[in-house]
Image (cartoon, grey):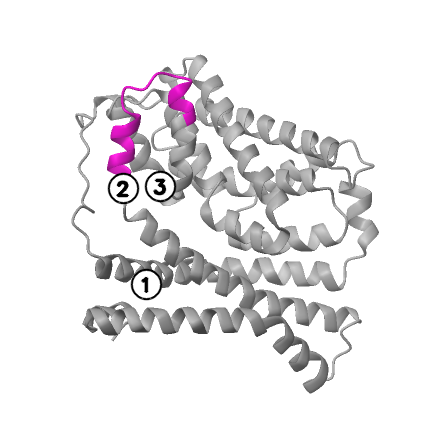
């Protein structure tokens, strides 16, 4: 019997008691995680935590568990909250909105609504068919993967409120400005014709109406299992690369090629980030290690945004509804915004 089936079989009282017990266990594990692995790797196994091997191993096991715990808690809470806001309802809210106001609303809604690269095509078709302007739709598509709840929570847990607030503000500005610029360019001719032939009427048809709290808890559990099953290889690869950098790569290597003294550091970071494929969970360990190595915050945010917002799989999916010139323009405008934000933050927050 699967986890979701066991949750579904419980009575409401047992489900709430189980949820409370799970929360207590989560907080306890998160509180002792660092100390436990320090004791296990340093004292029990006997590795020198000051050595490259010891520090790399400690980073890998400690961060793997920490990020796993964060993901479990974040995905569950966000899924429960998302159960009150469906894609259909979002489409209805944006339908008929003028550019400018619509771009701001789309970027804000993109942060809180359920969206990932796998739903890029149906979301795009649904929005355009419902009468949402192309630029407004693109603001939503940029904001949804770029400023997502997992990235916000992980950034806050790893770096605190300052970098997190900068990330949110920068992502929303990029989504609003890029969508507005793309909308003013009148690029509808580069959208596949069948998209405009789809008729949805712009009506909100929310299949999530009438859900009980038990249903929402069940959805949270199922989403945690589904997402972790899908992303765990990328998560381990990201943390493994972070451990290698943490333990073996010399600090001055990164400072030399992407540090504050290199005027092309942000461009290099974005150029490397665009072809990479990862998500917020996978790229965050690398960001943490590079931050510890002394890279400026603007360069780090630019790298993370490029990886998350301009992934190759999403571009391949969007090719079903967008012609190559529009995809290239979409990448260029979004990348230009990311580069500008990176340089601005490096100027405002010197390393």
Q: Residue 13 in magenta?
A: no
Task: Categorize mark 1 by other alpha carbons within 10 Å: few (<14), some (14-19), many (20+).
Answer: many
Q: How far apart are marks 1 and 2 (CA)?
A: 18 Å
Residue 278 visible in rendering: no
Residue 224 sits in quarter: bottom left
Span shown in magenta: 86-104
Camera-nearest residue between 106 and 192: 106
Percent x, y of residue 92 = 25, 29
Percent x, y of residue 12 = 21, 69
Q: Is mark 2 on a helix, strand or loop?
A: loop
Percent x, y of residue 176 = 47, 25
Which residue is the site of mark 1? 221
Q: Tag on residue 86? A: 2
Q: Is mark 1 on a helix, strand or loop?
A: helix
Q: How far apart are marks 2 and 3 (CA)?
A: 7 Å
Ranked by sequence position, the earlier of labels 1 and 2 is 2
Which residue is at a point 40% across and 31% down the rendered structure image? 140
Residue 71 visible in rendering: yes
Residue furthest bottom as drawn: 44
User: Quick check: marks 2 and 3 in contact, CB under 8 Å?
Assistant: yes
Ranked by sequence position, the earlier of labels 1 and 3 is 3
Percent x, y of residue 222 = 30, 61
Q: Distance between the residues labelled 1 and 3?
A: 18 Å
Which residue is the site of mark 3? 113
Q: Residue 100 in magenta?
A: yes
């Amino acid at each position: 019997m699967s986890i979701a089936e066991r949750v579904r079989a419980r009575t409401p009282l047992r489900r709430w008691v189980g949820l409370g017990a799970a929360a207590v266990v989560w907080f306890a594990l998160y509180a002792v995680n660092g100390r436990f692995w320090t004791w296990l790797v340093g004292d029990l196994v006997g590795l020198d935590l000051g050595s490259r091997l010891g520090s790399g191993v400690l980073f890998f096991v400690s961060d793997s568990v920490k990020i796993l715990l964060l993901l479990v808690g974040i995905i569950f809470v966000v899924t429960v909250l998302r159960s009150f806001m469906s894609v259909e309802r979002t489409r209805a809210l944006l339908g008929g909105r003028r550019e400018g106001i619509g771009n701001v609303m789309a970027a804000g809604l993109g942060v809180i609504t359920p969206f990932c690269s796998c739903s890029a095509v149906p979301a795009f078709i649904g929005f355009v068919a419902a009468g949402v302007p192309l630029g407004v739709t693109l603001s939503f598509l940029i904001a949804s993967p770029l400023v997502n709840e997992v990235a916000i929570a992980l950034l806050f847990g790893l770096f605190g409120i300052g970098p997190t607030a900068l990330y949110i503000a920068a992502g929303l500005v990029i989504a609003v400005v890029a969508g507005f610029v793309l909308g003013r360019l009148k690029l509808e001719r580069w959208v596949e014709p069948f998209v405009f032939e789809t008729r949805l009427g712009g009506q909100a048809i929310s299949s999530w109406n009438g859900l009980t709290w038990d249903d929402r808890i069940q959805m949270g559990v199922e989403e945690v299992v589904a997402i972790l099953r899908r992303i765990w290889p990328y998560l381990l690869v990201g943390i493994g690369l972070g451990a290698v950098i943490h333990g073996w790569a010399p600090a001055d290597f990164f400072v030399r090629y992407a540090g504050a003294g290199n005027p092309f550091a942000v461009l290099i970071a974005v150029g490397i980030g665009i072809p990479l494929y990862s998500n917020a969970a996978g790229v965050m360990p690398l960001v943490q290690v590079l931050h510890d190595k002394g890279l400026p915050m603007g360069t780090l945010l630019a790298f993370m945004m490029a990886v998350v917002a301009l992934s190759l799989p999403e571009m391949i999916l969007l090719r079903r509804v967008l012609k190559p010139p529009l995809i290239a323009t979409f990448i260029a405008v979004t990348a230009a915004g990311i580069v500008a934000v990176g340089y601005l933050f490096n100027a405002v927050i010197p390393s």
